[in-house]
Image: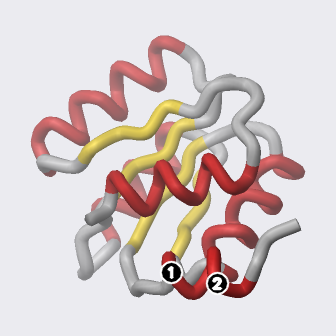
């Protein structure tokens, strides 16, 4: 299980936007991020993802893409990330929660 020390070392107010079609995984990842102090928004389609970006008044620090995001959606988000100068973290199918949080923390420094 996670230690309080692990979460407190990640505490921050950095913003991430997650894209993925599987609601259960999105809920779990969002909860982990929120417990660690991140502000996390979730989109299930590339169009919803773009809507978050255009409506957000505060820029995101990182885009997170699920391993099940289509190649077409990945390319769309890739173009957006280049324009916005925001890094993309593309998840593999099995990332342990502690590794997920560590990677996100490292990429949003």
**What residue is rendered at 75% in x and 72% in y?**
31
Residue placed furthest toward the top? 71
**What residue is rendered at 49% in x and 31% in y?**
90
**Judging from the image, what secondary structure is the residue with disc 2 in?**
helix
Say which mark, if any, is on residue 88. Answer: none
Looking at the picture, does residue 70 appear above or below residue 107?
above
Looking at the picture, does residue 109 appear above or below residue 26?
below
Image quarter hosting the C terminus: bottom left
The x, y position of residue 22, in whole percent, is 80, 40
**Of residues 1 and 66, which is closer to you in this image?**
1
The x, y position of residue 33, in whole percent, is 62, 70
- Cα–Cα gap, marks 2 and 1: 6 Å
**Judging from the image, what secondary structure is the residue with disc 1 in?**
helix
The x, y position of residue 24, in whole percent, is 88, 51
Q: Is residue 70 left or right of residue 59?
A: right
Q: Is residue 108 left or right of residue 81?
A: right
Q: Quadrant of residue 45?
A: top right
> Does the residue at mark 2 contact the one at mark 1 (Cβ under 8 Å)?
yes
**What residue is rendered at 29% in x and 29% in y?**
78
Looking at the picture, does residue 50 appear above or below residue 40?
above
Which colour style is shown? secondary structure
Say which mark, if any, is on residue 9. Answer: 1
Q: Is residue 20 left or right of residue 51?
A: right
**What residue is rendered at 36% in x and 39% in y?**
88
**Is disc 1 surrounded by few (<14), some (14 to 19) or many (20+) residues within 10 Å?**
few
The x, y position of residue 32, in whole percent, is 71, 68
**Of residues 81 and 101, which is closer to you in this image?**
101
Q: Is residue 65 left or right of residue 52?
A: right
**Is disc 2 surrounded by few (<14), some (14 to 19) or many (20+) residues within 10 Å?**
few
Image quarter hosting the N terminus: bottom right
Q: Quadrant of residue 61?
A: bottom left
Task: Name the residue that disc number 2 marks.
Answer: 5
């Amino acid at each position: 299980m996670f230690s309080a020390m692990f979460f407190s070392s990640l505490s921050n107010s950095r913003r991430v936007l997650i894209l993925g079609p599987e609601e259960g995984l999105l809920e779990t990842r969002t909860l982990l991020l929120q417990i660690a102090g991140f502000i996390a928004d979730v989109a299930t389609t590339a169009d919803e993802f773009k809507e978050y970006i255009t409506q957000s008044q505060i820029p995101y620090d990182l885009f997170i893409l699920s391993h099940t995001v289509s190649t077409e959606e990945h390319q769309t988000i890739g173009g957006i990330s280049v324009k916005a100068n925001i890094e993309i973290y593309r998840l593999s199918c099995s990332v342990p929660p502690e590794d997920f949080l560590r990677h996100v923390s490292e990429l949003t420094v």
